[in-house]
Image (cartoon, rainbow, N blue to C red):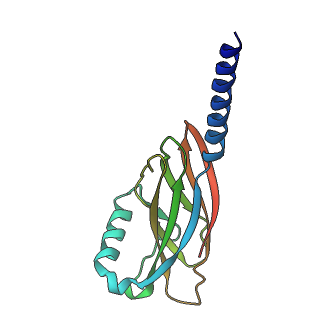
Amino acid sequence: MKIFAKVLSLITLVALLLAGYVVWASTAQVSAEGYLVEAAADRADSFTGVIGALRNGSENIVAYDAENIGSVEQYLFVTYTIRIRNSDLVELEWIDIALQNQPGDVLLVKPTVQDIPAINESLLSCTLMVERAGFPNYERAATLSYYIYGHYKEIPITLR
């Protein structure tokens, strides 16, 4: 009977440790890896494609001030890169990012929805189109959202 009690105690301990790990690891580790600024004129094909996607109502485009888009020389593309680490035993699903726009932001090209497998990491990029005029500040507050175990989670992050 003592052996049976010890085995049950061991099984209970392992179950508690596993439950603790699941709770600890269910929050993704997120870090901003920096940004790259490029003139939209240097990526004229991308500019044309983004404007076309905006006019066609693409779900990956978030318009902030895109009513009167001018010529390609008036804009810059700022591409932010974010590293997301999943330490959990199940994948992170439906990852999305939302930026708090600032004056001069025209539109955001969001990444396509992707999942991050269990115990893995991934880089996520999103591109912000901003007006060239003025002295732009490229630092942005953002919120990364995802689902894990069927629960919605949000993580605030500063992109710099």
Camera-nearest residue between 120 and 53: 120
Q: Between 112 and 72, which is closer to the camera in this rendering?
A: 112
* Location of residue 68 in the rendering, given as x and y in whole percent from the top left corner: 45, 75
Q: Is residue 27 left or right of residue 68?
A: right
**Residue pictured at 50% horizontal, 46% vertical:** 92
Q: What percent of the width, then of the height, locates residue 97?
A: 53, 58
User: In the drawing, does residue 82 fall left or right of residue 70?
Assistant: right
Task: Specify the quadrant of the image occupied by residue 26.
Answer: top right
Residue 3, compared with residue 22, is above or below; it is above
34 over 125 or under it: above or below:
below
Q: Determine whether 120 is above or below 71 in the image.
A: above
In the image shown, does 131 or 155 lie closer to the viewer? 155
Residue located at (38% from left, 57% from top): 57
Q: How many marks?
A: 0
Furthest-left residue in this view? 45
Which quadrant holds the C terminus?
bottom right
Q: Residue at x 32, y 67 (%)?
A: 52
Residue 137: horizontal and vertical position, in percent?
60, 83
| Residue 109 appears in the picture as rendered | no
Classify the position of the N terminus by image quarter: top right
| Residue at 31 percent of width and 70 percent of height | 49
Q: Is residue 116 above or below residue 82?
A: above
